[in-house]
Amino acid sequence: MTSDSPAISADAAAGAALAAALEALPKVELHCHVEGTMRASTVVELARTAGIPLPTADVTELYRYTSLDEFLSVFWLVQSTLRTRDDWARLGYESVLDAARHGRVYGELFFTPARHLAAGTALADVVAGLADGLAAAEAETGSITMLIADIDRAFGPAAGVRMVEELGRLRRANAPGMARVLGVGMDSTELGVDPASFREAYRLAARHGFRLTGHQGENSPPSAIATLVDDLGAERVDHGLSLVDDPELVARFAAERIPLTVCPNSNIRIANAFPALAAHPFPAMRAAGLLATLNTDDPALTDLDLGYEYASCAAAFGYTFDDMVTIALDGVAASWLPAAESAALRTRISAAADALRPD
Ligand code: ADE
Ligand code: ZN
């Protein structure tokens, strides 16, 4: 068969139609770091303004990693360019414009302010700046974005407690932007860190009424995932990859519908955990009944977007359009939207799916 034979062209056309429909499908994202959405051009501009030397004129040259810890050092450099409330506003604004272009209608985004707080930035300025930018982009695109304040494990448990204390103060004071901060999570390195050491911060966050999630199982065993949920009280797990190594825990998470915010392409490009999507356990997770959702993690730093995440997973795992709509609806189920808004978004996604379904 030649490369332009009718059978191959028909397959290619069907693949392209599926990708286009998935790009347009309204989608939810629950695992995306706002700093990881920063445009390369914005990194360069903010670094220049802040007088931060970058090791190369083309920052995308930095975006190659062979491990999570290597990635994190680039992530930290990108974070360090954010100095003022206006910088955070610009980041929030551009982040939502870029995501809305690929069909994201609702997101719960992480921000991780540990190094800014350690440098003397006020958490109030970070939250207010982000919220300004998110609101401006929401007015233009209709894409809604809420926030999750992540503890950076690399700064240790005491810094985590201090961040949550300040979040609690800002929430009680109804400070600008705090209505968008739904929850508390934690990210950064997992190697050699016992999640239980963050118990006090999580307890405090729960007392202040924040929802709880956390990165775990990207680079740590299933026992660490169990600790996050059972000891720290997390309602969701970000990544949760290693869960598949513990069939009993898988069965329990499936029965309890504990959501996992999985990022298959990130696991290839950042964690270098798999050579290609075909080797990723996402289909096994779904087949086991897990509430495993699809997300990009750090799209600008990894050259990803949510439309591509859906289309590439559909192609690699042999999923139909309706399989992908089910995954999109599971994103809503895993979200922290209030019941009425969750129901409305489900209806919106189903109606759009009916209009977009390829022949
Ligand atoms: N911060 C940004 N991306 C991350 C990831 N994939 N894992 C842990 N921390 C992160
Ligand atoms: Zn992440």
Image (spheres, grey):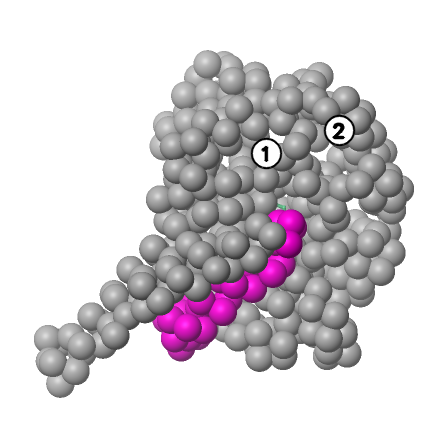
Q: Say which element carries label 2.
A: helix
| Residue 108: quadrant of the picture | top right
Tag 1 residue: 76
- Relative height, residue 234 to residue 318 (above, below): above
Range of the magenta residues? 312-339
Towards the viewer: 329 or 231:
329
Q: Give the residue drawn at x 71%, y 42%.
A: 183
Mark before the other along the chain sequence, 2 or 1: 1
Assign the N terminus to one quadrant of the image. Answer: bottom left
Instruction: Give the residue type at disc 2.
Output: Arg
- Relative height, residue 72 to residue 171 (above, below): below
Q: CA distance from mark 2 to mark 1?
A: 27 Å
Secondary structure mostly seen in magenta is helix
Q: Residues within 10 Å of mark 1 (few under 14, many from 20)?
A: some
Tag 2 residue: 171
| Residue 205: quadrant of the picture | top right
Instruction: Give the residue type at disc 1.
Output: Trp
| Residue 98: quadrant of the picture | top left
Left or right: residue 106 versus residue 319 is right
Q: Give the residue drawn at x 25%, y 66%.
A: 17
Q: Residues within 10 Å of mark 2 (few under 14, many from 20)?
A: some
Residue 21 sits inside the magenta stretch: no
Assign the C terminus to one quadrant of the image. Answer: bottom left
Q: Give the residue drawn at x 45%, y 47%.
A: 105
**Quick check: can you spot residue 199?**
yes
